[in-house]
Image (cartoon, rainbow, N blue to C red):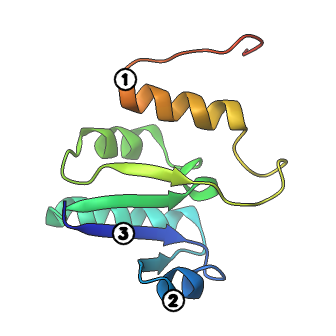
């Protein structure tokens, strides 16, 4: 694995950079998608971490391309935002399990 690539909101970028992470700022989902597509097209190797609020708005086509890219696995970083704007915890955990074991699990009470 090459390196850690992180896409986050502009206000959080300096903190990650101070921690030694190669962090890229994206003001919106479109900017984040452009970064991801450029890395996929260039054959970038590494681990991609994306702010969950940005990743939640990625379209199915982009997510499928990311799922198929073995050289650039990805994960969602909790945004730390209030629950009204962040991805629900159950969805976050279910998605991590789905990507790890290869199939979808549901929790009691899921719709």
Q: Looking at the picture, how far across and down is residue 48, in whole percent?
A: 37, 59
Q: Is residue 25 something one can see in this rendering?
A: yes
Q: Which residue is mark 3?
A: 5
Quadrant containing the C terminus is top right
As drawn, is 6 to the left or to the right of 67?
right
As drawn, is 94 to the left or to the right of 99?
right
* Marks 3,1: beta carbons within 8 A: no
Q: Is residue 15 above or below residue 52?
A: below
Q: Looking at the picture, how far across and down is residue 15, in whole percent?
A: 59, 84
Question: For the point 58% across and 58% down, which residue is it?
Answer: 54
Q: Looking at the picture, how far across and down is residue 109, in whole percent?
A: 78, 12
- Label 1 crowding class (10 Å Cα cut-off): few <14, some 14-19, many 20+? few
Quadrant containing the N terminus is bottom left
Residue 43, by quadrant, is bottom left
Label 1 to label 2, Cα distance in Å?
Answer: 34 Å
Question: For the point 48% across and 18% down, which residue is it?
Answer: 104
Residue 39, by quadrant, is bottom left
Q: Secondary structure at mark 1?
A: helix
Question: For the point 26% across and 69% down, which residue is it?
Answer: 3
- First in sequence, mark 1 or 2: give its number: 2
Q: Which residue is mark 1?
A: 101
As drawn, is 54 to the left or to the right of 70?
right
Q: Secondary structure at mark 3?
A: strand
Residue farthest front in this picture: 19
Label 3 to label 2, Cα distance in Å?
Answer: 14 Å
How many numbered discs sit on the rendered protein?
3
Question: For the point 68% across and 30% down, which residue is it?
Answer: 90
Q: Which residue is mark 2?
A: 18
* Marks 1,2: beta carbons within 8 A: no
């Amino acid at each position: 694995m090459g390196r850690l690539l992180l896409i986050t909101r502009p206000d959080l970028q300096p903190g990650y950079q101070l921690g030694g992470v190669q962090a890229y700022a994206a003001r919106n989902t479109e900017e984040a998608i452009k970064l991801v597509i450029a890395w996929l097209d260039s054959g970038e190797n590494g681990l991609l971490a994306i702010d969950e609020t940005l990743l939640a708005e990625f379209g199915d086509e982009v997510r499928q391309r990311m799922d198929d890219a073995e050289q650039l696995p990805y994960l969602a970083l909790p945004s730390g935002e209030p629950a009204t704007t962040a991805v629900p915890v159950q969805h976050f955990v279910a998605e991590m399990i789905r990507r790890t074991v290869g199939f979808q699990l549901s929790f009691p009470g899921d719709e």
